[in-house]
Image: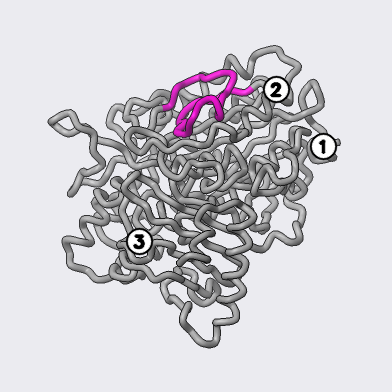
Amino acid sequence: MLGAGLAAAGADGRPNIVLIVADDHGTDALGCYGNPVIKTPHLDALAADGTRFTHAFCTTASCSPSRSVILTGQHNHRNGMYGLQHDMHHFQSFATVRSLPGRLAAAGYRTARIGKFHVAPESVYAFQTVLSGGAANDPASLGRSPVEMAEQTRGLLAAEEARPFFLFFAVDDPHRGNVVLPNGRPSFETYPAPNPFGNRAAGYPGVTPVRYAPTEVIVPPFLPDTPECRAELAEYYQAVSRLDQGVGRLVQLLKDTGHYERTLIVYISDNGVAFPGAKTTLYDPGTRLPCIVRLPGRRRPGAGQDAMITWADLTPTLLDVAGAPASAGECDGRSFRAGLDGARLAGWDETYGSHTSHEITMYYPMRSVRTRRHKLILNLAHGLRFPFALDLVQSPTWIGVQRSGAAVYGRRPIAQFLQRPEFELYDLASDPDEVVNLADTPALQSVKRELVEKLKAFQHATLDPWRSKWVYE
């Protein structure tokens, strides 16, 4: 039984599932999450007709690893996707891993994907229908044209089928955009001009550009309030408004084809915004993300949900919705189906993070445990300087701060950002920006010990290869 909240289902009694995944979109740039400037009417409407999760987290703020967690329910250190999939990075999941599309296909769902993919091997993450290939960081990718993406799903939505469908709709927005240099080489570096975040003068079919002035954007505390940063945030906002229009078109197509009232719609992002201090870190700007769920037959439209969930919980939840739950131990996450309509969930008060690499040159394994009050980060390679992703070190925001000679980036000393201790402990109530490290504070040693034990238990339960460091180092 799927429960009253999922009664309005497809012809075979199960709902369709649409999973919309944005690329590098934080809660900082959504109207329904409190930003009064940015225009996201379609996502705001989805939240008003569904449930807005306020404490949703990715487990790693890196594209391919995060997507592997989303589609398997296993942490990247368990499924093998330790870093980026494309080009020389060449990370991929183990061939024995079972993915959400494969499981849903075995359960009788039609599975289709469109837009960014960025995981491997395809045998593990196989979809029955590929509506577009989805290359990583490709300026010509369909993933930058979300209204076109929506239009290409018409055939899937219009098909007269008794079987429900699972659609993985993955836009490239609002990821930083590659620009082509005179020598033909793609690059993220545009200084002193802001990165375009995929925006282009020619626009995109079906999209009405929404442009923002640098003076009107809201600079979050973890970023520097500089002209370079404001100019980039204005481009970022425009990319978010573009993806919002794609979501709007997709929702309208679901309504036009009679699927809206029998489709579970989930909107998330793979990780936070592509600025230093967010993406590739385990700080909240990189991991605390939007999660909007619109449930068929919902009883609490516009509800808020404060359960602390992670993307490791998505696959078990969607399998539960589909009536094909994973066996015990197959996933690191657990189903939060009972809270999809906003019902209070007890016992969802801590989350875990696991980052290993991003690019192949960016080995910097970190593990974290976060409660409602505290966060502990373990920097397993703390002797190394924190490595930068190419799109972040080439960002005009970072270059501008470096050239200014400033010692602080946002509210964090740059020296503290680049050279980290073994443990970072933050009191999120008094220090939500995670700047004051309390790991050596005598009064908090009992809190630290408790969180360390939780972290050890998490690593053992999820078969983390790095758990051996507790013994040998």
Q: Residue furthest front?
A: 472
The quarter of the picture where the C terminus appears is bottom left
Q: Which of the two discs, 2 and 1, sits closer to the camera?
A: 1
Read off the residue under disc 2: 258
Q: Residue furthest top?
A: 160
Disc nearer the start of the sequence (2/3): 3
Check if residue 349 falls in the magenta segment: no
The disc labelled 3 sits on which kind of residue?
Leu
Which residue is located at x 21 percent, y 55 percent? 399
Instruction: Give the magenta range.
Output: 111-134
Read off the residue under disc 3: 223
The disc labelled 2 sits on which kind of residue?
Gly
The disc labelled 1 sits on which kind of residue?
Leu
Q: Between residue 182 and residue 250, name the one nearer to us.
A: 182
| Label of residue 2 in the image | 1
Relative horizontal placement of residue 371, taking residue 385 as reference (left or right): right
Q: Residue furthest left?
A: 182
Secondary structure of the residue carrying numbered label 1? loop
Report the magenta stretch's main SS.
loop
Disc nearer the start of the sequence (2/1): 1
Relative to 410, residue 341 above or below: above
User: Measured from the top left, where is residue 289 in percent x and y?
Assistant: 53, 51
Find the distance from the CA under tag 2 to the CA under tag 3: 44 Å
> Is label 2 in contact with label 1 (beta carbons under 8 Å)?
no
